[in-house]
Image (tube, rainbow, N blue to C red):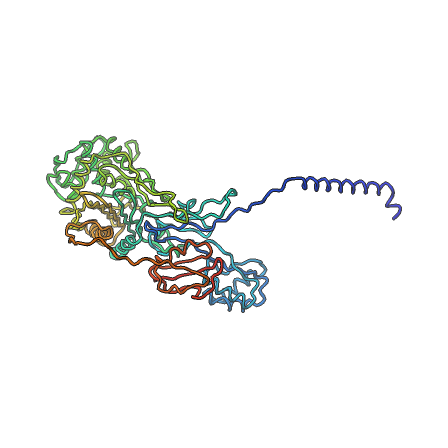
Amino acid sequence: MNNYFGRIRVLIFNIVLILALAMTYLKYVKLSLTPSVDVQSIPSMKERGSIVDRNGKHLAVQTDFYHFIVTPRDIKDVEFFAQSVAPILNMNPYEIVQQINANSTKSFLYIKKKLDVREQDELQKVIDQNNFNFAGFERIPGRVYPENALASQLIGYMGNDGVGLSGIEYIMQDTLSPQISSDMTADRHGQNVYLTIDANLQYKLEQIVAEKMEETQAESMMLLAVDAKTGELLSYISFPNIDLNEYGRATSSQTMDRPAVFAYEPGSVFKIFSAAILLDTGSVLDTDSFFCDGVYEKVFEHDRIRITCLEHHGWLTVRGALQYSCNEYFAQATENIATPAFLERIRSLGFGEKTGIELPGETRGSVKNENDRLWSARSKPTMAIGQELSVSALQMVQAATAIANKGVPIQLTVISRITTYDGKDLFVHKPVYKPQVFSERTTKTILSDMETVAQTGTGSRANIRDISIGVKTGTAQMADLVNGGYSSTDFLSNCLAIFPTDDPKVILYIVVAKAKGETYAGRIVAPVINEAANVIIDHLGLQRGSALGASHNGILSITPSVPVEIGDTLPDLTGVPKRDLMQLLQRNDISVQIKGDGYVKSQIPAAGTPITENMQIELYLE
């Protein structure tokens, strides 16, 4: 030992030790002299903004869900645990045992995801009573859709990670849930998005669409109602739809936003735009006549055109051509307009381009040009009757705003307002007018012609009698995606309406795809226009020609709304109307979930329960 610890070794050891201590001391001194830095925690998002209708009716609201988790390796009596929690989870105890045994060595296992506050509360009681210290919950942000399937594709859906996956939830993600940054000094709320749709009107029109879907056994159906003065969508319907609270079970057909993404040939409805182009360019006059003998034939150097008509209409002006939907009139009339001018006018209406509405995945449709490899001598006349081009339902109503607004198209929108969580306006929609595409005289002629279609033409079943309405129907063969060409069994029936024609307020458009049995638009879609238009007229309070006059002193007696107040304990809210509960959604100290519509039927927790911070309250309405 004495030989190993020689003088030289001890000296070297001491030198190394002294150097190490010196370095440690110097680092300590340096750190002590460095100014301290305040560490600020990044604030978390308190609440995702709500999506509401134009009147403030809640369509998507913030809530919390819970994932039920366990540590399998710490569970002593698996069967007892499974028997205890299975009834609350609505699961088979054997299924729970299998899950745990299959992961017995793991420290983390999800038993069930997305439990609501009631299930979480009941499970917590069982956990506390039985000292299940291996079980707990993972709290995740969630979304409740009080109106279930109403306007489902428009509203869209939020995923488990708090990010929108479709519709307004997706496209307005940064508005509903702003990005959190380190320079924020306070907790943030998302902004509230007010849609342009009226939920009550939407519900009434969805009932009509649902009945027609069942009656026709159609594959799909769309209905759009637009404010002709502002471009705001009053109703936005795409069927089949899906209960947003069950979005995980939806099929691709149910989640498809057809008005925005589905491109199709519109058929004869497109003739109103062709007629407007021909009149506005002076290619034809409203007094010019063309003779229809049932077929249009034209022979070119390398091509031969043959377009048939349903009838032998004889001599027709543009009014008669629209009234009887004459193919031959339009085929002959397009000889008077140069192809580039015709195509340019079609594009000026927005066809071939996205409308720019606040929705994801919008299609451009397609409008060919003369250099297209599929262009032929028959392309121009067939485009005039709504074939050899594809459109979306949104493009059709966008173009119709030009007819309804004296030749000036209006930008479509589904966003009415954006507000802060406490109701301060950040954005209020104002109509956006596009460059004029038709003269006022042209649009008056077209509206008058469309009114004739409703009175005595192919759209007579849409006629309302006591209010002026202009319509145009169309039935188009759909593409055969298997064999190519057109299908002999699949048809698309659509109808466009504008009313009142003397001062247009509403544009209404309906599309039915692949109906079984009757497919002629004048028979299956025009009656739906009639029914839907009547609902809209009454809902908006438009004046009818046969409406009876009545005198009134101008004084209305309205029972005032009494907001609910919650003090130290939860009151009995049974029977309270939904409108009196709305202010509870703005409170930061408690979380309130309102499910359903009407009046409170039941509540969780029960009346008399002491109020605690961040308490979860669920109210079920009928």
Residue 253 x/y as whole percent: 35, 51
Residue at the spot 42% in from the left edge and 45% down from the top edge = 175
Residue nearest the observer in this picture, 209 or 96 = 209
On the picture, is 217 further left or further right than 163? left
Residue nearest the observer in this picture, 483 or 215 = 215
Residue 310 x/y as whole percent: 16, 44
Residue at the spot 26% in from the left edge and 57% down from the top edge = 557
Q: Is residue 253 visible?
A: no
Q: Is residue 60 above or below residue 383?
A: below
Q: In this view, does 431 lie above or below 67?
A: above
On the picture, is 373 further left or further right than 60? left
Residue nearest the observer in this picture, 485 or 146 = 146
Q: Quadrant of residue 307?
A: top left
Residue at the outermost right position:
2
Residue at the outermost left position:
315
On the picture, is 177 further left or further right than 432? right
Question: What is the quadrant of the C terminus in the image?
Answer: bottom left
Residue 146 x/y as whole percent: 37, 56
Q: Is residue 131 above or below residue 46?
A: below
What number of labels is visible?
A: 0
On the picture, is 60 further left or further right than 503? right
Q: Can residue 134 be seen in this view?
A: yes
Residue nearest the observer in this picture, 477 or 551 = 551
Residue 387 x/y as whole percent: 24, 40
